[in-house]
């Protein structure tokens, strides 16, 4: 009976590992969208395929997908004008989310050599 315990523990560990690795995984379509937008900002140069992929991987390691959607949306819509844009420009909480994403993105870009 003692011989069965180590393999059982190893099996449980092996089963739990993929769940941990996928905890902050982003949908493929969102990763691709990020990389394509990033590459467009850099004249579509091939080298940025790897650099931009690295950047979104860094971001995915730092925050979960739901938080990513919130903070990225907050930053993306900061420039909206008029009444619709007021929701994204005025509240302090939204400004804080946008600032967090900008800092996170800047840190990831620096780590991945994206200028």
Image (spheres, helix red, strand yellow):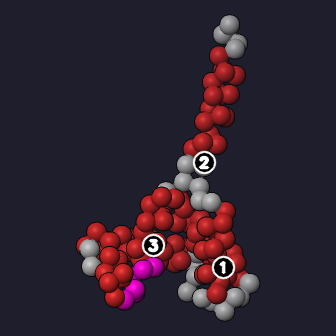
Q: Residue furthest bottom?
A: 43
Q: Looking at the image, is mark 2 or mark 3 nearer the viewer?
A: 3
**SS for tag 2?**
helix
Disc 2/disc 3 C-alpha distance (Å): 25 Å
Q: What residue is disc 2 on?
A: 21
Q: Is residue 47 magenta-colored?
A: no
Q: Are marks 1 and 2 in contact (CB under 8 Å)?
A: no
Provide residue 100's location: percent of width, then percent of height: 38, 70
Q: Which mark is residue 36?
A: 1
- When the figure is inspected, residue 73 is found, relative to residue 37, above or below; the finding is above
Q: Residues within 10 Å of mark 1 (few under 14, many from 20)?
A: some
Q: What residue is disc 3 on?
A: 73
Disc 1/disc 2 C-alpha distance (Å): 24 Å
Residue drawn at x 53%, y 77% is 109
Question: Which residue is more in the foreground, 104 or 68?
Answer: 68
Provide residue 22's location: percent of width, then percent of height: 60, 49
**SS for tag 3?**
helix
Quadrant in which the C terminus appears: bottom right
Magenta-highlighted stretch: main secondary structure? loop
Specify start and end residues of the magenta stretch as a single range.
76-81
Residue drawn at x 64%, y 43% is 18
């Amino acid at each position: 009976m003692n011989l069965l315990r180590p393999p059982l523990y190893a099996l449980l560990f092996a089963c739990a590992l993929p769940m941990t690795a996928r905890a902050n995984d982003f949908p493929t379509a969102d990763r691709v969208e990020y990389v394509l937008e990033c590459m467009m900002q850099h004249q579509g140069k091939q080298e940025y395929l790897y650099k931009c992929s690295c950047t979104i991987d860094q971001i995915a390691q730092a925050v979960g997908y739901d938080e990513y959607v919130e903070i990225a949306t907050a930053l993306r819509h900061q420039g909206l004008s008029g009444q619709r844009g007021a929701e994204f420009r005025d509240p302090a909480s939204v400004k804080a989310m946008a600032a967090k994403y900008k800092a996170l993105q800047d840190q990831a870009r620096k780590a991945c050599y994206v200028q």
